[in-house]
Amino acid sequence: MATRVTVDSTLTREEALRRFRVGLDSIGDLANGSTDQTDLVKRFVAAIGARDTAALGELALTKQEFAWIYYPTTPQGLPPYDLAPSLLWFLVEGRGSQGLARALRTLGGQPIIYSSHSCDTEPSIEGNNRIWGPCQVTIRTNGTTSTLPLIGQIIERNGRFKFLNYTNKLD
């Protein structure tokens, strides 16, 4: 006799978010971020040059921060888009992982000097969050100055900054 499988595709947004948050303590602020964009991007450049994936992990939005801080107010999680939190997290994390791998492959292990960075001049306001980007980073490597799309977006909340993800257009 075949086992019957039921797929529940009609979860409410609230129930999908409740299930996504299981095991994730409630939080209201970003942890391990920076107090300004420049410090955040400088830390990123130094970590890429050193191939320090632990430091890079601390600079990016965590699943817990996504669940409690970002998802509740992002337009992609609200009508008319209504992406489920698990799907949106999969997309954010997947694109960020690919971008980080590209940045490490392209620049990792080289002496890199931060020169400047720029993001869109006006952030997108999403509840208590301000989303900056896309961003460009100007660096010096081996005597050459380059402006590259190394990072996608930066999230700011209550004076703390982290990378929403490491999406980039390298390669």
Image: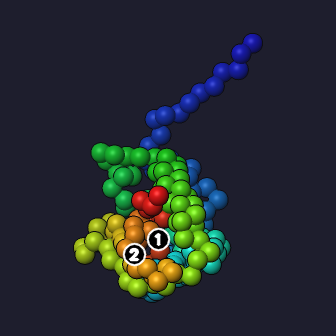
Q: Residue furthest left?
A: 122
Residue located at (37% from left, 59% from top): 74
Query: Where in the figure is residue 40, as x and y percent of width and height?
Result: 47, 81
Read off the residue under disc 1: 163
Read off the residue under disc 2: 146
Q: Residues within 10 Å of mark 1 (few under 14, many from 20)?
A: many
Which residue is at the front of the view, 30 or 104? 104
Is 91 drawn above or below residue 6 in the view shown? below
Which residue is at the front of the view, 70 or 38? 38
Is 109 drawn above or below residue 152 in the view shown? below
Q: Amino acid at mark 1?
A: Phe
Q: Could you tell me which quadrant the N terminus lies in?
A: top right
Which residue is at the front of the view, 156 or 104? 104
Q: Amino acid at mark 2?
A: Ser
Residue 96 in view, yes or no: no
Q: Are marks 1 and 2 in contact (CB under 8 Å)?
A: no
Residue located at (30% from left, 45% from top): 80
Query: Label 1, label 2: how many angstroms apart (C-alpha)?
Result: 21 Å
Q: Secondary structure at mark 1?
A: strand
Q: Residue furthest right?
A: 1
Which tag, 1 or 2, sits closer to the chain's start?
Answer: 2
Q: Secondary structure at mark 2?
A: strand
Q: Residue furthest top?
A: 1
Residue located at (36% from left, 52% from top): 76
In the visual, does 157 lie left or right of 4? Answer: left
Query: Where in the figure is residue 124, as x and y percent of width and height?
Result: 29, 67
Residue 105 in view, yes or no: yes
Residue located at (49% from left, 47% from top): 87
Q: Residues within 10 Å of mark 2 (few under 14, many from 20)?
A: few
